[in-house]
Amino acid sequence: MKKNVLVLAAAVCMAAALTACGSSNSTAETTAAAAETTTAADTAAGSTDTAADTAADTSAAEETEGAGGKIVMVTNAEFPPYEYHENNTIVGIDADIARAIADQMGMELEIQDMAFDSLIPAIQSGKADFAAAGMTVNEERLRNVDFTETYAEAAQVIIVKEGSAIAAPADLTGKKIGVQTGTTGDIYADDVENAEVQRFNKGMEAVMALTQDKLDAVIIDREPAKVFVKENEGLKILDEAFTEEEYAIAIKKGNTELLDKMNAAIKELKESGELQKIVDKYITAE
């Protein structure tokens, strides 16, 4: 009887062992299957997130490339006929050209008025997209901004009072010269030997100082000079220009996307004759 009990006990233990082994294998298989399911789910979720991110990036890129949105121009609206105030609106050659460019790009144009020497810093800081302000392309500015293709030829001229002994740029030596701060006239005036250069925030302020005998001459761009002389009796523009130059639109350095779009728009305006129509609207042929 004792022997039979021992055999029975052994059989029970063996059965229990086999059952335990079977349960262990089953649990391992279940765990592995669950792990595979979790991994597959994570992979699927990751793929979904990546696809969503890619779609979002693509959508943002399309929004940037496509039409719509606002583009900000800065200028100094004291520079007729290129930019000036009329009925609480900034108008002029540059303003009209900028509006035509914005229309071609399918964007809304916002124009902000500020001091001329604040224009480039506004572009560099990202407060504005571009500056159109009768701005001459020169090496100093090219170190700080990029320029579009030129859209107008210009010149720095000399305004004096009628009867003045100053008849040519060479006669400016040792004279009191008025300029608008930050303009090319400001830059070039420093090269005049022994001249006393006085700087003003607005070109008109320099002209008024000339009429009051506080200056001997004013160096300024040709077209604004014509307006100022017409509005103030007793002034004249010397026949010989101080310098010849060209205007272009300034854009943040490295913004090739905007540069390419604006160059394409300027090219279209030139080829269609629209740009010349804008110029003719403000400048009467002599």
Image (cartoon, grey):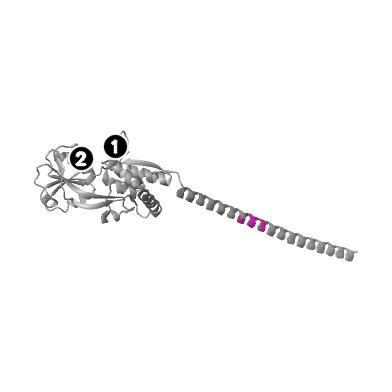
Please name the amino acid that badge 1 sits on: His
Please name the amino acid that badge 2 sits on: Phe
Tell me residue 243's x, y (percent): 20, 52
Tell me the tag on residue 213. none
Q: Circle 1 sits on which residue?
A: 85
Q: Main secondary structure of the magenta part?
A: helix
Residue in the foreground of this view, choosing between 137 and 127: 137
Tell me residue 165's x, y (percent): 8, 46
Residue 231 against residue 220 in the figure, above or below: above
Which comes before the other along the chain, label 1 or label 2?
1
The residue at the far right in this view is 1
Answer whether labels 1 and 2 touch (C-beta < 8 Å).
no
Residue in the foreground of this view, choosing between 149 and 279: 279
In this rendering, position of residue 195 left or right of residue 88: left
Residue 23 belongs to the span the image colors magenta = no
Residue in the foreground of this view, choosing between 178 and 136: 136
Tell me residue 261's x, y (percent): 40, 51
Label count reads 2
Q: Circle 2 sits on which residue?
A: 228
Which residues are drawn in magenta? 36-43
Residue 39 belongs to the span the image colors magenta = yes
Q: In this view of the protein, can residue 176 be seen by the observer?
A: yes
